[in-house]
Image (cartoon, rainbow, N blue to C red):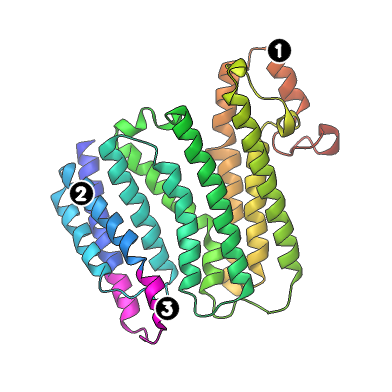
Amino acid sequence: MQAAFSRLGQLAGKFAAAAGAGVRRQFASSSSSSTAGQASLLQTFRVPLRSSLLAVTLGLGTFGRPAAAASFASSAAIIDQVTFKEMGLLSWLLVDVAIQWGGWAVSALLKTEKFFDMLGTGSFAALAVGSLLASKSMHARKIAATAFAAAWAVRLGGFLVMRVFKSGHDSRFDEIKQQPFRFWIFWTMQAVWVFTTLLPVLLLNSSSLGGPAALLWSDVVGGVVYATGLAVEATADGQKFAFKMDPANKGKFIDSGLWSYARYPNYFGEMMVWWGMFIFCSGGLQGAQLASVVSPVCVMLLLRYVSGIPTQEKQAAARWGTTQEYQDYAARTNLLVPLPKCWSSKAS
């Protein structure tokens, strides 16, 4: 484990130094013509980015990785030389990774998981708003897409943070937070999740125009799908949280509200949100940019086959799988779609 962590420190330091130098080169040729207002707003991005890199420096230094810590400190200094006037995707990836690794450093030192969801969803809002402010031009579609992403992040982030503080802990990290290397893997996976999921918004905000000025079918359809998904996700989360907060329901599974129709309506809402976001943003994307469809596809695959439903199904089977009541519940409900089962396919 020590050898692996040592290697991690070396790779992290090299990445930070290379990425920081790359950002500096990227902006070295940029024109300095920007309004005082833009410069003032964009200047604020130096603070969280530099702070995150310095937090990682502290963490690596504490864990005995002085060489890697020095590299991160050097990258933090490089940030002072960068003008965030026109942020490219590489630069936003650097911001994303710096936030997550900074969060990991502090959380590993304090052995707490309470910053994980806060910084995860907060990164969505920070990158979406930041990429809009750094955009070459403003467009109603860019502003709306950014607002959609920020609204989702604030809603989900507020809910997750409230839940972990109410319960006192997040069971996912009871053991992992005691192991810095494994904890780092989760924070790094979160960085990948944030960047991949937000790709349509980042590409839209990075485009020169943002698509036609006229209202497109994709704006209407995408907006409706997004709003429906957000409503379903928020309703499902609220219903389950209220159910679990009632002492009378301790040890029971929820089978009321949207949960009486599907076992994971919250995940269905999440999938709809990001399909809606992609459809909405597609009106301002073209060519290779449409490959950002990877965003909703990855969200679907992640929730359906990796970290969402498989984990929850395993826990449900361990707790209630042998009871007739749960077996009947599973038989009469859909997996995802919160509709009466006779209205949807068995594959749902």
Question: Does residue 253 appear to the left or right of 217 in the view shown?
Answer: left
Q: Which mark is residue 37?
A: 3
Q: Determine the main secondary structure of the stretch shown in magenta.
A: helix
- Say if mark 2 contacts mark 3, CB within 8 Å: no
Q: Which residue: 66% across, 25% down?
A: 254
Q: What residue type is labelled 3?
A: Gly
Where disc 1 sits, the SS reads helix
Figure quadrant of the C terminus = top right
Q: Bounds of the magenta span?
A: 21-43
User: Would you name the residue on which mark 2 appears?
Assistant: 58
Tag 3's secondary structure?
helix
**Badge 2 or badge 3: first in the primary sequence:** 3
Q: What residue type is labelled 1?
A: Gln
Tell me, for residue 339, which label it has, or none: none
Residue 210 position within the rendered picture, expressed as x and y whole percent measured from the top left: 60, 76
Residue drawn at x 50%, y 63% is 128
Instruction: Give the quadrant of residue 82.
Output: bottom left
Q: Which residue lies furthest to the right in this view?
A: 342
- Specify whether residue 164 is in view: yes
Instruction: Say if the magenta span includes residue 4.
Output: no
Real-space Cα separation, disc 2 to disc 1, in angstroms: 53 Å
| Residue wearing tag 1 | 324
